[in-house]
Every structure is written in C-alpha cells, then in structure tokens.
Amino acid sequence: MDEPTLIAEARQGDREAFNELIVHYQSLAYNVAYRVLGSQDAAADATQDAFLSAYRAIGRFRGGSFRAWLTRIVTNACYDQLRAKQRQPTAPLDSDPDQESEEWVMDPGERPEEQVERQELGRVIQCGLATLPADQRTIVVLSDIQGMSYDEVAHVTALALGTVKSRLNRGRRKLRDYLMRNQELLPARYRLHDETAGIGGLGNLLLECSVNRCAIRLLGRGVGYYG
Amino acid sequence: MANRRWKLGKTEHEIVSEQLSLYMDQQLTAFDRARAEQHLSACAECRQGLRSLRWTRQLLRQAPVARVPRSFVIREADVVPARMAGRRGPVFALRWATAIVVALLVLVFAGDLYTGGLLTGARLASAPMVAYERAVEKQAVEGEQVVATQEGTPSVVADEALQVAGMPSPTAEAAARMAAPEKKVEATGAGAAPTGAEAAPTGAGAAPAGAEAAPTGSEPAPTGTPPPPGAVALSATSSGEQTSTPAAEGVAEKARNGTPPETDATATEEPQPESLAATEQPQVGLPKTTLVQGREARPASSWRIGWRAAEFGLGAVLLVLVITLTWMRLRR
C-alpha cells in the first residue's frame, strides 16, 4: 500500500482510496476504541464515526503521521461516546454484552490453551483499565497497548509531553496496583513471581484483595465498563 | 543518601519511586537517571516497584488484539444519508426557521426606518426644539435691550402681555391664527402663546377660534396628559418663560376685567414694547406650530404600531428558537 498516494487520492475525494486506508487502520482504530470504551458496540460506533469524520476532514490533513491523525480522531470519537453516555445516567451501565462474545486475533503459532490464557489476560487488563480515569486510560492504551512513543502520544492527545509522562506514570501505577491485587485472576504464566520470597508477602496481598468488587464482577459476567 | 531531602521536601526515595516509569522508558535526564540507579542499588522496595512496573507494561503489550467485528469501509450510502439526515433533522429545520426569522426581523427594522419610524420621529422631535431655542435666545437678547431702554418696567414678558392686551390687532390675530388648529396642544399649555390668545377677547375682535383657545391656554399647566419628549424639552427650556406667566396672567386678568393694568401707562407710553411683542410673539409661537405638526403626525402614523408589534413578535419568536436550538444541542 502506497499510503501517501492513497491519502492524496482520498483528498481528491476518491472514496475507494480512503477505504483502502480504512482497511489498513480499522484494527488499530477499533482496538483503541475498544480499550478506551470497554464495549464492542460502543467501540464499533466510535470507530465508524471516526472514519466518517476522517473522510470528511481528509482535505484538512496537513501531512505528517496519518496514523497519529487518525488515532486522534478516534480518541475524540471515544470521548464523544463517553460524554453522550454520561448525559444519560438512566441507561443501565452493564447493558453491554460481556467479553465472552468478543473475538480475538490469535497468533496461529499459539496452542489453544495459550490462546485461552491470553484471552483471560485481555479480560483482566480490560477490567483494570476500567479503574483508570479516561485521560489516563487513553494514554496507557496508546503507549503500552498500541506501542506509541511519548511524542506520538502527545501528538495524538494534543497534550504537553510532561502531561503525557505524568498521566502515564499515574495510570501505570494504578494499573499495576490493580493487577497485583488480582493476580489470581491471571493465568499462572502471567503472574508476577517474587524472585526472592516466592509467593510470600505478595501472596498475602493477593489473598487479601481477592474479594475485590471488580474481580467478582469479572468472574461473574464480564468487564464492560463503558459508561 | 536515601533519606536526603530534595526539592519540595521530598526524600530521594519518594522522588525515585515516582520516576520509575520514566526510568523504565529511559526518559530521565542523565542526572535523574544516575540518581535513580544509585538509589535502586540500595533500595529493595524501589527495585520491586520497578519490576512490577515492567511486568505491568509487559502484560499490556501482550494483551490480545480484538478482531474487528465488521468492516468499517465507507459506502456511498453511509455518506449521502448522513448528510441528508443532517438536513432533514429537527435541528436543521430550526436553524432554517431561525435564519428566516432573523431575515424578517432585519426587513421589519429596515422598513420601520425607511418609513420614518425612527428617523422622521427624531427629526420632528428636534425641529421644534431648534426653532424654539432660537426664538428664546432672540427673546432674551431683545429683552435685555428692552430692560436697558426702559427702566422701571417689572418684566419684559409683562410688557409683552400689556402690549398685547392694549394693541392686540397684529399679535392676537397671529396668535389666534396659530392657535386655531391646535387646541390639543394648547391644552398641554406653554406659557407665552396663551398670553396673546388670552388677550384676544379683550382686544379688538379676535377670531372665535382664538377665543375658544384662550380659556384653555390660560391654564398655567393643566397637563392632563404627560407631554411627549419634544414637549418636555420645550417646557424645560421655557421654564424662565413659565415663571413669568403669572405676571402675564395677572395683567391679562386685569385687562379682562376692564381695569387698566398698573403698568399700562408705561406700556402705552412706550411704543417700542409693542413692536417687540408684535415681532416676537409669532417667533415664540412658531416652534409651537412645528411641535403641533409633529404631534399630529404621530396619531396619523399610528400604523407604526404595527411595525413595533412585528418587531417585538419576531424578537420573541427568535428568542424561543434560539433557546430551543441551544437546548437541543445540549441534549445531544
């Protein structure tokens, strides 16, 4: 795919050229939206809205990283979805389908049990992300899940680099605390083993926190937190 | 070293533990990095914190990728209906309605201005003001001349009234002619002109209209109805004249009763005040006729109320539309 050519053609109004860009970036866009919103339907709506907005605004694209430009539109669409949901407090919070119906892209080299364990890991991470504020969650998703650099995250979120660093630091620490409290929900191979004392004190911590409310919810019916 | 206090009163341990995320991503400066490495070599808690952060980042990087539930390619139907839906929605209709109301409001304002609702009204209101002020100034100058030439006269206006009472032929007739079509204005009453009209019955054969106007005009300030702005300004500028009105009334009353006024001798002896009154009185009355025309033009243009009603009505509709649009936008 010659991205600059496709972008140039899309700027001339070529819908097919823009659709080729969509095919290339729709997985990125949907996964960002899904991790930020925590719901398949909301993520699909945000992704569709983002692509439509990008199609209408492609004429204003000034060059640079198309990926960052598109991701910025996606995150804005996610914030729109969150705001719209907040304005409807009467809507049931757990109306979203659980993640059992979610389909994952699996590495064909993985064995089936490894794929299941990764799905479990994905659910625990999603539940942990739900504990973060939206601004920290977005930056953690962009940086640690999508693998963007600090500068790219700052460009996508239109934030100062220092703000990105501080929010990522706080988000990581909160998520770390959550994951350490709920390690029993993780497959064994993803747990953090104490290199000096074995399970030791960390095991006590995990035992103490195993009745965490979100853990119960996660075990019961899924981790959708959109809204 | 670990307990050494740095800026903001934080210990080195607190600072390094907060910088572990940046240290992990190699985002620290050389100084901070050296300090962190030195501290990590001595602090097991920070080492454990760094390890847990690396573990967290590793887990996030291993998070599975969600499969896209459907294709998000844009079809022609996705683009066109979205635009059309935006045009057919209630917000679109309200926007058009608001634009139309604004256009109508502009047209109504323009029509009101063009047909003289504001400009002509201002011109009519200001015309008698200018003329009357000019007349008052002239009267003041000539009054000073009179005072300088005849000492002993109580006031210029009293002399005018005496002269009008004694020799009414030019003054009373002129005042009567002017008073004839303006009974309403005389009812609101200014001071100077009524003296001439009031003197008419005692004078030599004034017009009946002047005689009719005289009793009402002789009232100091009946003001059953509040005077319009022009009249208010007029009465304000003629306050000095109104102060002299009782004197003139007293003279005129005596003339009506047939008793010669006290200053009649001086008035008849001096012909100059007569000419003064004869030349001055119409000038004082002139702005009144203009004012009368302005006042009579307002009832004649009562259709302007329609303009006002349209302006207020459209303004109310516009306010409702703007509030509705704002509410719908906030609700969305």
Image (tube, rainbow, N blue to C red):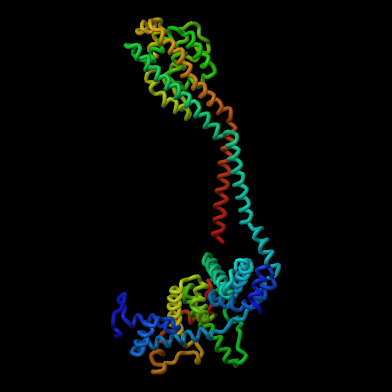
Whole-percent x, y for residue B214 in the image: 47, 14
Q: Is residue A198 positioned above or below A215 on the image?
A: below
Residue B106 visible at all: yes
Which quadrant is the N terminus of chain A positioned in? bottom right
Whole-percent x, y for residue A79 in the image: 53, 69
Whole-percent x, y for residue A88 in the image: 53, 65
> A10 left or right of A94?
right
Q: Is residue B211 positioned above or below B22 on the image?
A: above
Viewer-nearest residue: B221 or B102 = B102
Residue A211 visible at all: no
Whole-percent x, y for residue B298 in the image: 55, 28
Give the image quarter of residue A27.
Answer: bottom right
In percent of the image, x 65 and y 68: which residue is there?
A: A11
> A217 left or right of B39?
right
Q: Is residue A200 positioned above or below B88 on the image?
A: below
Viewer-nearest residue: A209 or A74 = A74
